[in-house]
Amino acid sequence: MAPKTKEQTLAWLRTISGELATATLKRLDETLPWYGDMPPGRRSAVGLVAQNGITSFISWFEDPKSIPWIAADVFGAAPRELLRSVSLTQTLQLIRITVEVVEERVGDGDDVLKEAILLYSREIAFAAADVYARAAEARGLWDARLEALVVDSILSGEYDNELPSRIAALGWNGHGEVCVLVGTAPKMLDVDQLRRTARHLDADVLIGVQGSRLVLVIGRASPASEDPDAAPPMPFLTIAEQLEPGFGSGHLVLGPEVPTLVDAARSAKAALAGFAVARSWRNAPRPTLADDLLPERAFAGDPLARATLINKIYKPLQAHSTDLLTTLWCYLDNGRSLEATARELFVHPNTVRYRLKRVSDVIGWDATGAREALILQSALIVGSIADPAERKRAGQQSGSRSF
């Protein structure tokens, strides 16, 4: 029979505190699989938390108005990494089992003790939630700072060997190719919504805000399947279209794909350069590919755009066939007229059509479209300026005219 007076109850609780702690550890081992799977060091730390809970209850029961018993009394002896290895749900399971053991041992004791146990268990549960909330808030602030640092490193292209470890610390789930999406930051940025949308698209994102710009580094969350019958991965442009509502008004530019996150600086530079000149394309779609803004970027002095025009358009055509390069020059110089091009080259219009189709097959751009024709003509101009053979030929012609 439980003691009647409070002093007797306290003395009895102190006598059985060791017994309660032992019974609690045994119950934890029997009922919680995650506890049994823990390494010995962490099992010991969790057991210490349970023992501290019992000791703290006895001290509080003796004088509830004394210095407030707080969660630190219970969790203070546990190592800091315990908060990362034991979830809030598991902590609440620990509290529930501890309370059950104490209640069973109290049995038919007086109502004051039972009420005290209920009050203490309720308050310690709230206190535990507060500890985890504070830890999550601190972790969130740290993650936000680390994420901003990683995005800044990607945008600047200045990073060291620690970048992969920082990315891993953020829990990056991306695999393979990466793209950078740049747009205007909204007045009220909903980071969680952007992340939810990305997860729904089987993608992962790093988010950075630089002044009025919102930058997203996008990667696919699932690795590429080696099964030839598997569905192809979602194009980055489609992912960008789904993320578009999370940006503010204005232009939205998607950089080219790069192999890995460490190479994302190339995509970022292209996207930033495209975003800076996107207003010069009157009917630019949203989002716009950075490579669709190659002429504007080249006119603005972007060396990456000039190199892309030369390496993706001018040199492949030059290496494939001089006839294709000459036909494209003539077609664009003649206002995209098949008949005028055929007359200049002394060929049939169908030959011009065939060569233009071959141009499209080789480089992926169609000269018959107005926008793509501008890209191709810019590539021809930039390529001919940079071509040593063209410069030599121009110098020879200039020298011959001087006589």
Image (cartoon, rainbow, N blue to C red):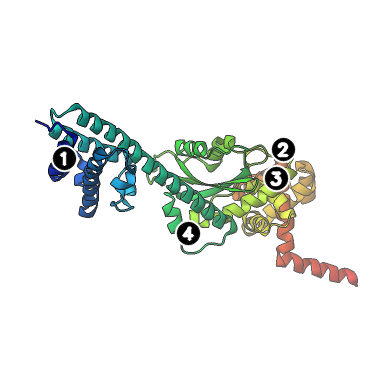
Q: In the figure, 223 relative to 6: above or below?
A: below
For label 2, the residue is: 283
Is residue 376 visible in this depiction of the protein? no
Tag 1 or tag 3, which sits nearer the N-term?
1
Q: In the figure, 144 relative to 285: above or below?
A: below
Query: Helix or strand or loop: what does disc 1 sit on?
Result: helix
For label 4, the residue is: 163
Q: Is residue 29 left or right of residue 152?
A: left
The reply to whether discs 2 and 4 touch (Cβ–Cβ < 8 Å) is no
Tag 2 or tag 1, which sits nearer the N-term?
1
Q: In the figure, 283 relative to 77: above or below?
A: above
Q: Nearer the viewer, mark 2 or mark 4?
A: 4
What whole-number distance in Å separates the C-alpha atoms at marks 3 and 4? Answer: 30 Å
The reply to whether discs 1 and 4 touch (Cβ–Cβ < 8 Å) is no
Give the crowd class for mark 1: few <14, some 14-19, many >=20 residues within 10 Å.
many
Name the residue type under label 3.
Ala
What whole-number distance in Å separates the C-alpha atoms at marks 1 and 4? Answer: 54 Å
The reply to whether discs 1 and 2 touch (Cβ–Cβ < 8 Å) is no
For label 1, the residue is: 13
For label 3, the residue is: 278
Query: Helix or strand or loop: what does disc 3 sit on?
Result: helix
Name the residue type under label 2.
Asn
Q: Nearer the viewer, mark 3 or mark 4?
A: 4
Query: Helix or strand or loop: what does disc 2 sit on?
Result: loop
Query: Percent x, y for residue 289?
Result: 62, 44
What whole-number distance in Å separates the C-alpha atoms at marks 3 and 1? Answer: 75 Å
Tell which of 77 and 34 is nearer to you. 77
Query: Percent x, y for residue 397?
Result: 83, 67
Tag 4 or tag 2, which sits nearer the N-term?
4
Tag 2 or tag 3, which sits nearer the N-term?
3
Is residue 183 visible in this depiction of the protein? yes
Tag 4 or tag 3, which sits nearer the N-term?
4
